[in-house]
């Protein structure tokens, strides 16, 4: 067991991979941290200011959106045309 990466204390709120896992109420809630949203906004802003967009940066933004879609309502993304390249 890697003790540096492990948490041996019980807690109701944990931050894992920049997601906040909150188990304080009757049901578990997963939220996105502010720095993860800030990073997504920064990447979108950079992409919009460029004259052209390469596939790699568009795929990075799409991947960030997909990873957060279950935490942010309505939660369903329509990115099929974006990732169909």
Image (cartoon, rainbow, N blue to C red):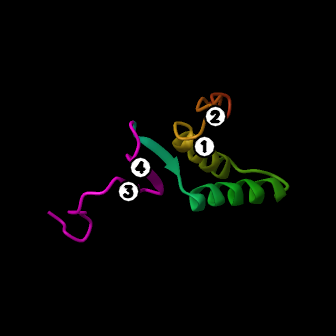
Indicate the secondary structure of the residue bearing disc 1.
Answer: helix
User: Which circle marks residue 65 in the picture?
Assistant: 1
Q: Which tag, 4 or 3, sits closer to the chain's start? A: 3
Rendered image: mark on residue 14: 3
| Chief SS of the magenta region | loop
Depth check: give the residue in front, 53 or 80.
80
Magenta residues, start to end = 1-26
In this figure, which residue is indicated by the disc labeled 2? 85
Instruction: Name which of mark 2 and mark 3 comes first in the sequence.
Output: 3
Crowd band around label 3 with a 10 angstrom C-alpha radius: few (<14), some (14–19), many (20+): some
* Mark 4 and mark 3 residues within 8 Å of each other at the beta carbon: yes
Work out whether mark 4 precedes mark 1 in sequence or the reverse, and give the earlier one. Answer: 4
Q: CA distance from mark 4 to mark 2?
A: 34 Å
Q: Nearer the viewer, residue 45 or 28?
A: 28
Distance from Cα at disc 3 to Cα at disc 1 = 22 Å
Q: CA distance from mark 4 to mark 1?
A: 18 Å
Looking at the image, do the residues carrying marks 4 and 1 touch, with CB atoms under 8 Å apart?
no
């Amino acid at each position: 067991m890697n003790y540096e990466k492990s948490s041996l204390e019980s807690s109701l709120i944990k931050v894992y991979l920049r997601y906040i896992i909150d188990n304080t109420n009757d049901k578990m809630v997963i939220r996105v941290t502010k720095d993860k949203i800030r990073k997504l906004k920064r990447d979108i802003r950079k992409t919009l200011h460029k004259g052209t967009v390469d596939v790699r940066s568009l795929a990075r933004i799409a991947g960030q959106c997909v990873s957060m879609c279950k935490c942010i309502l309505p939660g369903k993304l329509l990115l099929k045309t974006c990732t169909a390249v």
